[in-house]
Image: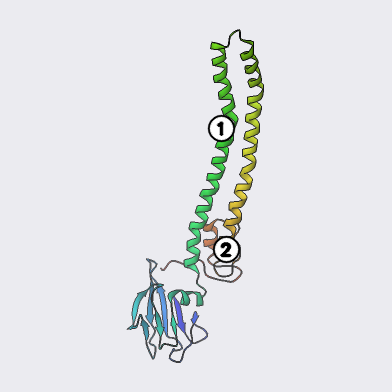
Amino acid sequence: MIRIGKAGDNDAVVTGDYVSRYHAQLVRTEEGIWMLEDAGSTNGTFVNGKQVLRRPVREVDRIMFGGEDCVRTLTDILHAAGDYSTEFEALKGTYEAFLAEKVRIQSSGIFKVRLLQTLPLAFLGIGGLVMGIVGKGNSLLSGIGLVAMICLPSAGIYLGARQSAKIPGLLQEKITDFRTKYVCPKCGASFGEQPWEVLASRGRCPACKAVWKRADPQ
């Protein structure tokens, strides 16, 4: 529950001429819906211009406490209470997308390396078969075949090594981009590559104390 009002011991302190000391509260249901409840305020709580005692609210709603000098959105109230759980939840998708892209780069790179290393050998095998059929007794074709036997495996090793050398650079580029996005939504502290589930289990940022994950309602 998030208590809202002008008193300093509220979770979300809001000010205005018509705001009560303990004006309203936000309660999250088991379905993850935020319910706004008036706490017996003197001048009332309004959502989109209509006075309410209790109703679900969303980011698009215009919430007024007492009068026009105190209008907030759901995000304004949550942030005032240090709650960044919505933004933190979105980082789960960011982390999962990064893992998938990391696996894709590594798998694709390994496949290309193996392809480049084995393709010359395949050509060599086909060439040897052709030479055995049409090149018997032909010194020129025999010479070409000998050169191919020497050069093609070396070319495959070289091309495979070049492709393999590209993988760390591609990974580092993705890691750098990921780390600029995978940060505390309030203070911007970097999470590095820590699993999202590990961070979620902590519940809040150790630096700024922002709430990342609220306990499920009992």
Q: Residue at x 50, y 53 (%)?
A: 97
Looking at the rendered image, the quarter that the C terminus falls into is bottom left
Q: Nearer the viewer, residue 29 or 56?
A: 56
For label 1, count other residues whose C-alpha is less than 10 Å away and answer few (under 14), some (14-19) or many (20+).
Answer: some
Earlier sequence position, callout 1 versus callout 2: 1
Name the kind of residue labelled 1 in the image.
Answer: Leu
In the picture shown, does residue 112 fall above or below 132?
A: below
Mark 1 lies on a secondary structure that is: helix
Q: On the picture, is 146 further left or further right than 48? A: right
Q: Nearer the viewer, residue 139 or 159?
A: 139
Q: Tell me where residue 74 appears, x and y as whole percent.
A: 43, 75
Q: Can you give x and y, in whole percent of width and height, for residue 45 in the image?
A: 38, 84
Q: Is residue 213 visible?
A: no
Residue 99 visible: yes
Image x and y of residue 108, in percent: 54, 40
Q: Which mark is residue 214?
A: none
Residue at horizontal 38 percent and vertical 76 percent from the top: 61
Residue at 53% x, 50% y is 99
Displayed quadrant of residue 125: top right
Which residue was labeled with disc 2?
183
Quarter holding the N terminus? bottom left
Q: What residue sits right under mark 1 in the picture?
A: 115
For the residue pair 100 and 162, the one nearer the viewer reads as 162
Q: Residue at x 43, y 77 (%)?
A: 73
